[in-house]
């Protein structure tokens, strides 16, 4: 079983416009609403890849009820810690090949409420074989809660895939008591984390030797249409993806995380793990729905992924 954690879940609302006009009325006929937040995208893709998953996090209000109803309709198991605060909406406006996002901050929680979730999470670890932790933290909670989740999982030898960014990611990586099994920054997040400007493979290799990444087995740096640069233990790989017609890139990074989790659960080979992760990311870009893949196209894309060892 994979446990997918989303501490700041949302309803993801996608507006697709041919022309986005500022300071004017924009009428939208194509609206999509999904149970969102990065970890819920992860859970959905894991489910679509036919692997067992349970979604968890902190959830409340009418938006929280909408999210649970959506997960029920999709057949995705869930076990959230319920709160009396309203969860959030996140809006993505797709226009002229661009993506503009409007993200609500969401509720604010106390330290005691964070501790309540950790108790809830510990119970879920009893049936977990892999954990994914994705996205931002709600107000009132800091990176220490992610550190504690990783520590609790490590005591049970459960691998954790962490996908967050900014100061939270840096704080977690500075925590040496326990380490995530894998992280998945994109190239921009990596540059922000290390305060650098990476322009080539040699610089990527050097960047991934930074002490912040010590004892992390998998470092997957997503690079959009260029695929991904991967470090596994001491070896480096460039994972190339096929050219496809991109419909909606939102949620592709989450889909990569889902592919990683499924591969770890199924104990796939190193090469198949990389190919599965990137296949899931590519499949997401081919669909209009955020965090969605068509598993019937999996083998086709999987066979077109190329892995090149970087010396």
Image (spheres, rainbow, N blue to C red):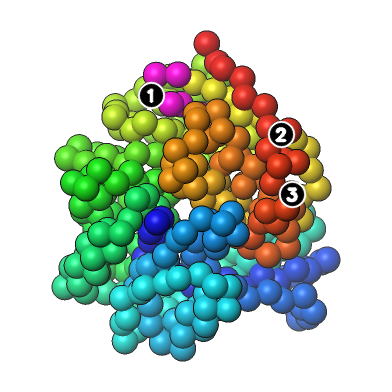
Q: Residues within 10 Å of mark 3 (few under 14, many from 20)?
A: few
Q: Residue at x 25, y 43 (%)?
A: 157
What is the span of residues highlighted in magenta in the rendered image? 230-235
Q: 70 left or right of 181?
A: right
Q: Residue at x 31, y 76 (%)?
A: 81
Q: Which mark is residue 233?
A: 1
Q: Is residue 225 above or below residue 207?
A: below
Q: Residues within 10 Å of mark 2 (few under 14, many from 20)?
A: few
Q: Secondary structure at mark 3?
A: helix
Q: Secondary structure at mark 2?
A: loop
Residue 21 horizontal/vertical position (percent):
76, 70
Residue 13 horizontal/vertical position (percent):
62, 73
Q: Residue at x 45, y 19 (%)?
A: 235
Q: Is residue 35 magenta?
A: no
**Between discs 1 and 3, the one toward the N terminus:** 1
Q: 249 left or right of 259?
A: right
Q: Residue at x 64, y 42 (%)?
A: 279
Q: Are marks 1 and 3 in contact (CB under 8 Å)?
A: no
**Between discs 1 and 2, the one toward the N terminus:** 1
**Between discs 2 and 3, the one toward the N terminus:** 3
Q: Which residue is mark 3?
A: 297
Q: Is residue 94 above or below residue 24?
A: above
Q: Which mark is residue 303?
A: 2
Q: Is residue 231 magenta?
A: yes
Observer-nearest of 233 and 213: 233
Residue 187 in sight from this viewpoint: no
Q: Secondary structure at mark 1?
A: loop
Gap in Å between the C-alphas at discs 1 and 3?
31 Å
Residue 176 horizontal/vertical position (percent):
20, 37
Q: Main secondary structure of the magenta part?
A: strand
């Amino acid at each position: 079983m994979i446990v997918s954690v989303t501490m700041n879940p949302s309803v993801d609302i996608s507006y697709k416009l041919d022309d986005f006009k500022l300071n004017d009325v924009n009428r939208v006929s194509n609206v999509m609403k999904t149970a969102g937040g990065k970890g819920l995208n992860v859970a959905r893709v894991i489910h679509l890849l036919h692997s067992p998953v349970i979604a968890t996090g902190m959830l409340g209000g009418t938006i929280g009820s909408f999210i649970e109803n959506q997960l029920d309709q999709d057949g995705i198991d869930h076990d959230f810690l319920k709160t009396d605060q309203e969860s959030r909406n996140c809006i993505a406006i797709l226009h002229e090949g661009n993506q503009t996002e409007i993200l609500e901050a969401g509720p604010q929680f106390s330290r005691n409420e964070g501790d309540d979730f950790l108790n809830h999470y510990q119970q879920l670890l009893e049936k977990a074989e892999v954990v994914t932790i994705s996205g931002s933290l709600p107000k009132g909670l800091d990176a220490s809660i992610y550190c504690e989740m990783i520590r609790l999982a490590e005591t049970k030898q459960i691998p954790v895939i962490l996908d967050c960014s900014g100061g939270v990611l840096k704080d977690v990586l500075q925590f040496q008591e326990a380490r995530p099994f894998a992280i998945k920054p994109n190239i921009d997040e990596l540059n922000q984390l290390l305060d650098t400007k990476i322009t080539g493979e040699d610089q990527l290799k050097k960047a991934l030797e930074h002490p912040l990444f010590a004892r992390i087995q998998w470092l997957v740096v997503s690079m959009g249409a260029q695929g991904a640069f991967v470090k596994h233990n001491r070896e480096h790989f460039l994972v190339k993806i096929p050219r496809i017609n991109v419909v909606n890139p939102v949620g592709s990074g989450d889909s990569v995380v889902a592919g990683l989790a499924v591969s770890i659960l199924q104990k796939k080979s190193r090469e198949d793990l990389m190919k599965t992760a990137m296949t899931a990311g590519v499949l997401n870009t081919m669909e209009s729905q955020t965090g969605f893949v068509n598993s019937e196209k999996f083998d086709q894309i999987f066979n077109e992924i190329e892995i090149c060892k970087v010396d």
